[in-house]
């Protein structure tokens, strides 16, 4: 399965939107947090996890999905949410804690929820797999169209819930795809120090499903492999486990000193940043010009700027509303 020129352009555009969005959030997040860093200060309080470098994992998968398909993501969700079509203005406002946010400002950046496109995420490690299996099961039981995709990090593959969910999906041949974003670090612990096998995709055989490993953080390779898994799920042949080698260009969270990284690792990753690599591919394969690129970059910046302005201009919830919509 080979992507069309329009699909590659779509992937590149959404990689740009994700990167520009997070660059804007990163800058705003630091407002009011100096000279002494305190995550409670500023217009965006709390933790912030950026997905810079992991954009291929989002676009290579979501290029195959539609609004009926369910996606459950992680505490590092922005790139996947953007690729799935989550309302960017609503997501920005949610991150700012504003009333116009997707959840009225009550969820924050680790709890983005948009039922219009069936997207959700959670700050709990490994939480994505159970709900995705449940969504896939509901589709089968109700004879509805749509598949489910669960994102998780390589560290979450050591959680018990991961193995329970894969076993259930394998037993019932459910239309679900498990996407492991292997960025080599579970917070500050390397994969080598936490995981007994080199590739989590090898675990797939234990649960009666195919396992695929995609090296190189390559959106085209991801598109091709995931396309086969999506066809498999939609045709009733069951689940697939896919592990993608990717890069976390930022720290685990904003304010992370990253002292655990080996010398030179981050600099080496920056040299293979997937966004300029994708731009070079478009230029080589489709004669993508500097003018073409400038237009798409400008469009991506405009979309992001509009979302950030919407969030900044929106109102905060009134204090007396703090307990509303919390308990049902």
Image (spheres, rainbow, N blue to C red):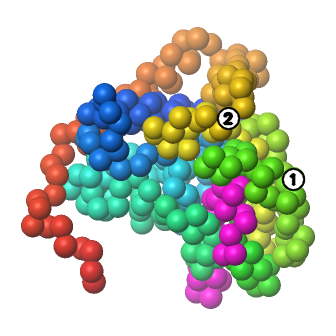
Tell whether 19 sits left or right of 9: left
Q: Residue at x 80, y 58 (%)?
A: 195
Mark 1: give few (<14), some (14-19) or many (20+) Cα within 10 Å.
Answer: few
Asked whether 70 or 162 is in front, the reply is: 162
User: Looking at the rendering, in which quadrant would you find the C terminus?
Assistant: bottom left
> What percent of the width, then of the height, locates residue 297?
49, 23
Marks 1 and 2, how far apart at CA: 19 Å
Numbered disc total: 2
Q: Which residues are magenta?
A: 136-161
Q: Confirm whether the magenta stretch covers residue 149.
A: yes
Residue furthest to the top in view is: 290
Q: Residue 11 is drawn in which quadrant? A: top right
Q: Residue 198 got which mark?
A: 1
- Measured along the vertical axis of the image, is residue 204 above or below residue 108? below
Q: Residue at x 65, y 18 (%)?
A: 288
Which residue is pictured at 27% across the width and 74% down the height?
A: 326
Compared to residue 151, the image places residue 22 above or below, namely above
**Camera-side residue of 143 and 96:** 96
Q: Report crowding for label 2: few under 14, some 14 to 19, many 20 or more residues within 10 A (C-alpha).
A: some
Up the image or down, 74 lies above or below 237; here it is: above
Q: Position of residue 257 (x, y in %)?
A: 53, 35
SS type, badge 1: loop
Q: Earlier in the sequence, mark 1 or mark 2?
A: 1
Whether residue 205 can be seen here: yes
Residue 246: where, in percent of width, then height? 71, 41
Q: Quick check: is 199 in the magenta stretch?
A: no
Q: Is residue 209 left or right of residue 267?
A: right
The image shows residue 325 at horizontal and vertical percentages of 24, 73
Q: Residue 258 versus residue 30: which sits nearer the camera?
A: 258
- Residue behind mark 2: 261
């Amino acid at each position: 399965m080979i992507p069309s020129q329009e699909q590659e352009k779509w992937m590149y555009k959404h990689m740009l939107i994700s990167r520009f969005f997070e660059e804007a959030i990163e800058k705003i997040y630091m407002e009011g947090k100096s000279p002494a860093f305190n995550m409670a200060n500023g217009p965006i309080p709390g933790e912030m996890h950026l997905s810079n470098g992991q954009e291929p994992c989002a676009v290579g998968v979501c290029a195959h999905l539609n609004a009926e398909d369910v996606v459950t993501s992680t505490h590092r969700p922005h790139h996947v949410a953007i690729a799935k079509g989550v309302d960017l203005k609503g997501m920005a406002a949610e991150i700012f804690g504003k009333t116009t946010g997707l959840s009225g400002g009550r969820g924050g950046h680790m709890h983005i929820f948009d039922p219009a496109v069936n997207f959700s995420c959670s700050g709990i490690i490994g939480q994505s797999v159970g709900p995705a299996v449940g969504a896939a099961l509901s589709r089968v039981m109700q004879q509805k169209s749509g598949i489910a995709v669960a994102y998780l990090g390589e560290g979450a593959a050591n959680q018990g819930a991961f193995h329970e969910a894969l076993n259930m999906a394998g037993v019932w041949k459910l239309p679900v795809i498990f996407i492991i974003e292997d960025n080599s670090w579970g917070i500050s612990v390397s994969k080598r120090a936490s995981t007994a096998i080199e590739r989590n995709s090898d675990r797939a055989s234990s649960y009666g499903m195919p396992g695929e490993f995609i090296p190189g953080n390559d959106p085209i390779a991801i598109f091709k492999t995931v396309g086969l898994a999506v066809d498999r799920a939609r045709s009733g042949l069951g689940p697939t486990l896919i592990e993608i080698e990717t890069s976390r260009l930022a720290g685990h969270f904003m304010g992370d000193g990253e002292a655990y990284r080996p010398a030179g690792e981050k600099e080496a990753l920056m040299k293979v940043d997937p966004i300029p690599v994708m731009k070079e591919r478009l230029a080589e394969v489709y004669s993508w010009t500097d003018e073409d690129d400038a237009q798409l970059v400008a469009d991506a910046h405009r979309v992001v700027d509009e979302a950030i302005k919407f969030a900044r201009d929106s109102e905060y919830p009134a204090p007396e509303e703090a307990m509303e919509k919390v308990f049902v």
